[in-house]
């Protein structure tokens, strides 16, 4: 069974960074790209970027360049997204999803930026 | 960026009714279009990909159609479990972009 298990919800201070994980199981991690998505009430769903774990290649939505950094650890079948210099605009639910079809999604991580 | 205009924003349907949701792309997306369902507090689930291909395990009352810039999702015979939010995603060109969503409720 394919599963994407994300880390827990986060409460972070403005200006801080947060790193979210997405552990894949039930398939060969390096066979598929991992996509990251932001969902917020005001902006709907937004594609943040994509990482191809096999070759550690990333693609980013221009809007999130400098905000998000995607990495992958092939030894633990885990993808990561770090969000930096957080503001209230970054408060949202963040998902990882498998391959260009987004056929499997993680459960989501709610990031709340508040002092 | 490719804009995805989704309509309607909300929809109310009776049980057994057939409903349609549309997505209009700002340019040709060559059928690189997927549809998702999302229920409150849950992750989205893939329903349709490549405009008209039904994802494994998805009931056959869901169908997709379209080409070029115009695409639609049809639910033939609304069921209680079909309540939720629906949105489209274009995968033709980076940045990938989503429709703004349709909230489907039972009348």
Image (tube, grey):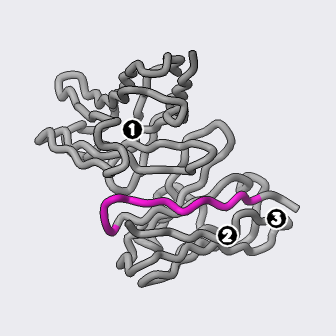
Residue A41 picture location, percent across and down: 63, 44
Q: Chain of mark 2?
A: B
Kindly identify the residue that appears in the image at 47 percent across and 75 percent down: B25
The C terminus of chain A lies in quadrant: top right
Does residue A70 belong to the magenta stretch? no
Q: Nearer the viewer, residue A52 or A89?
A: A89
From the image, state whether disc 2 or disc 3 is nearer to you: 3
Does residue B94 belong to the magenta stretch? yes
Residue A2: mark = 1
Disc 1/disc 2 C-alpha distance (Å): 27 Å
- Residue holding disc 3: B12
Residue B9: mark = none
Left or right of B58: which side holds B79? Answer: right
Left or right of B88: which side holds A37? Answer: left
Residue A48 picture location, percent across and down: 37, 45
Q: Chain of mark 1?
A: A
Q: Nearer the viewer, residue B5 or A72?
A: B5
Q: Nearer the viewer, residue B55 or B83?
A: B83
Element assignment for label 3: strand
From the image, state whether disc 1 or disc 3 is nearer to you: 3
* A93 to A7, vertically: above or below: below
Left or right of B98: which side holds B105? Answer: right
Q: Which span of residues is magenta-colored? A: B92-104
Element assignment for label 1: loop
Pointer 2 and pointer 3 on the same chain: yes
- Residue holding disc 2: B75
* B44 to B95, vertically: above or below: above
Crowding near the residue tagged with mark 2, few <14, some 14–19, many ≥20 C-alpha atoms within 10 Å: some
Element assignment for label 2: strand
Residue B42 picture location, percent across and down: 61, 39
Secondary structure, magenta segment, majority class: loop
* A109 to A62, vertically: above or below: above
């Amino acid at each position: 069974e394919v599963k994407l298990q994300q880390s827990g919800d986060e409460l972070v201070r403005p200006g801080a960074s947060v790193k979210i994980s997405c552990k894949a199981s039930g398939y060969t991690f390096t066979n598929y790209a991992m996509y990251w998505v932001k969902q917020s009430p005001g902006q709907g769903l937004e594609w943040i970027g994509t990482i191809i774990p096999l070759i550690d290649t990333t693609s980013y939505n221009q809007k999130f360049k400098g905000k998000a950094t995607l990495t992958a650890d092939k030894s633990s079948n885990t993808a990561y997204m770090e969000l930096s210099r957080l503001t209230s605009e970054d408060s949202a639910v963040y998902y990882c999803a498998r391959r260009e079809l987004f056929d499997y999604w993680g459960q989501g991580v709610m990031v709340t930026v508040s002092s | 960026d490719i804009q995805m205009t989704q309509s309607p924003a909300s929809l109310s349907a009776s049980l057994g009714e057939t409903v349609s949701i549309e997505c209009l792309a700002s340019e040709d997306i060559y059928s690189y279009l997927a549809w998702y369902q999302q229920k409150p507090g849950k992750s989205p689930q893939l329903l349709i990909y490549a405009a008209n291909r039904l994802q494994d395990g998805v009931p056959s009352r869901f169908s997709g159609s379209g080409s070029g810039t115009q695409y639609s999702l049809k639910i033939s015979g609304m069921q209680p479990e079909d309540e939720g939010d629906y949105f489209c995603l274009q995968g033709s060109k980076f940045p990938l972009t989503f429709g703004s969503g349709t909230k489907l409720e039972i009348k």
